[in-house]
Amino acid sequence: MSILDKTATELGAAIKNGEVTVMQAVEASLSRIEESESLYNCYVTVDREGALAKAQEIQKKIDQGILTGPLAGVPTAIKDNMCTQGLLTTCSSKILGNFVPTFSAQAVLNLERAGAVILGKTNMDEFAMGSTTETSAFGETKNPWNPGHVPGGSSGGSAAAVAAGECFYALGSDTGGSIRQPASFCGVVGMKPTYGTVSRYGLIAYGSSLDQIGPLCKDVRDCATIMEILASHDPKDSTSIKRDDTDFTDALVEDVKGLRIGIPRDYFGEGLDPEIKEAVFGAAKVLKEKGALVEEFDLSLAEYAIPAYYTIAAAEASSNLERFDGIKYGYRTQNYSGLHNMYKKSRSEGFGPEVKRRIMLGSFVLSSGYYDAYYLKALRVKALIKKAFDDAFAKYDMILGPVAPATAPRLGESLSDPIKMYLGDIYTISVNLAGLPGLSVPCGIDSRGLPIGLQLIGDCFQEKKLIRAAYTYERARGGFAGPMQNTGSGVSGGSAGAGEEA
Amino acid sequence: MANIISDETIEYVGILAKLELTDEEKERAKKDMGSMLDYIDKLGELDTRGVEPMSHVFPVNNVFREDVVTNGDEREAILKNAPEEKNGMFAVPRTFE
């Protein structure tokens, strides 16, 4: 088995027992990056020298017994909206094209304390606004399963880097599906934790009441292991929650007997690709055979989540992005007359079209005369959506459904019609509105050879139930071929029951 | 399209958003915002009388801490990011005439 075929925890164990050195792991990752980056463009910045120096430092600490954690020495990648001290952090925007933070995000510090080696910063939709990674100011990322297709977004660079073997795991952020959807499109595991579980300190804000950092990785064991490292109470984030149930790896148990799983009928109506429906029901069948109690129910309000979300997210974005004014950091226009003209021109030249579109919408729904009708109305609908989930979780331990209505679209097909693109977020968005945890795990491959994701949604603080169910499903499914092995022939050794043998 | 966005509205929103749009961008923004608002109007189908607006899912309280400096002097590193710097300070265009 080559180093790059190992999962993050497998590599961590191999480093620990001396089979592999940190340097070998980092060099293997860097040479894969060298081979395939020109094709996929997963990274905005590759920190080759930094990673090589770090490899030596971490190896020493492992040898001395200072670092003993499960992911010590494992190379990782960070989405480019998380601050990394001394390392360019652009949010894939021209306006931050030269920004070098003086501090690191708490989530990044947590990884570093656990011995992570950061290979670089991954590409994303500009300011995390988009579902395809095509709104990046630094070119689109391509899907390693088929470079004619998008990797999803906004954490598309992170998902593609994991799928392409250009890192062993990566951090993403999820405001309306930005971890789960690219994970699904790239055939990897992704998790958005309960709001407040991972510190947002140092995460460049998009929609502060919705944003959460989480892992993109190769399997459910990696997901639980990374989550244990990421979760922490942080006094620097006033929405950070003190939890004492973050021993997520304890939930890596193959047992779903008696687990009550609800399948929302509203998630399987018009607009869902029949191949995805078949794959997701196939996965539900697997869990049922393992002893879970699976039934269909009506969640209600699904179609109201998108308009409520885009109102709230745009409003928060218009406020959060006011800080980019060309004064303290970032881009400043060359030609201007006076302070206000400088603000306007710097912002207009620095932001891309999708970011401007959302800032405009957000400014409008917050403006006097429209605030009640749009913004407060959306917050009221958010309360109703939360209530609908509360009712569902009174009956079920978790909700099972698709991640997205279609597999990865072709490059260049999504941006022309914003509303159509926003509709692609229909199954992921309400999870952020209600602050819930959601997990995406591969469950099949469609007839075009592109991966399909299964989404498990839990009540607040119920990540462990999701991990247990996803782990049980993954074991039953068997190995999931990566894009490197993939020639469009389907899930290897799987009982996933979907789209096999394309 | 139910929502027609006027030139005045786009001008006004441009001021709020601190964005200077080209004529082409303005036309596009009028169309985009109109169709987004048509879509958002769907929320009007729901009766939300008596429902409190929910800004955060969990109760958010003020978090207090002692006002103690924990970081060091980072002036140099911070100023390195400034588009323009003068005598160890951020340089800005003249604000008062």
Image (cartoon, coloured by chain):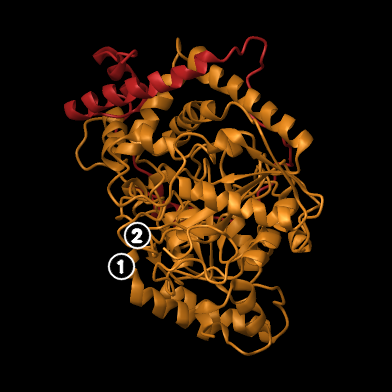
Chain colours: A orange, B red
Q: Disc 1, disc 2: CB below 8 Å?
A: yes
Q: Which residue is mark 2?
A: A142
Q: Amino acid at mark 1?
A: Leu
Residue A11's image quarter?
bottom right
Crowd tier of the residue under label 1, counting other residues whose Cα lies within 10 Å: few below 14, some 14–19, many 20 or above: some
Label 2: few (<14), some or many (≥20) within 10 Å?
many
Above or below for A102 versus A9:
above
B18 displayed left or right of A157: left
- Establish whether labels 1 and 2 are both on one chain: yes
Q: Could you say whether the residue bearing mark 1 is in a helix, strand or loop?
A: helix
Residue A426 appears in the rendering:
yes
Judging by the rendered image, the residue that carries numbered circle 1 is A39
The residue shown at (41%, 50%) is A91
Looking at the image, residue A392 lies above or below residue A249: above
Cα gap from disc 1 to disc 2, whole angstroms = 7 Å
State the SS at label 2.
loop
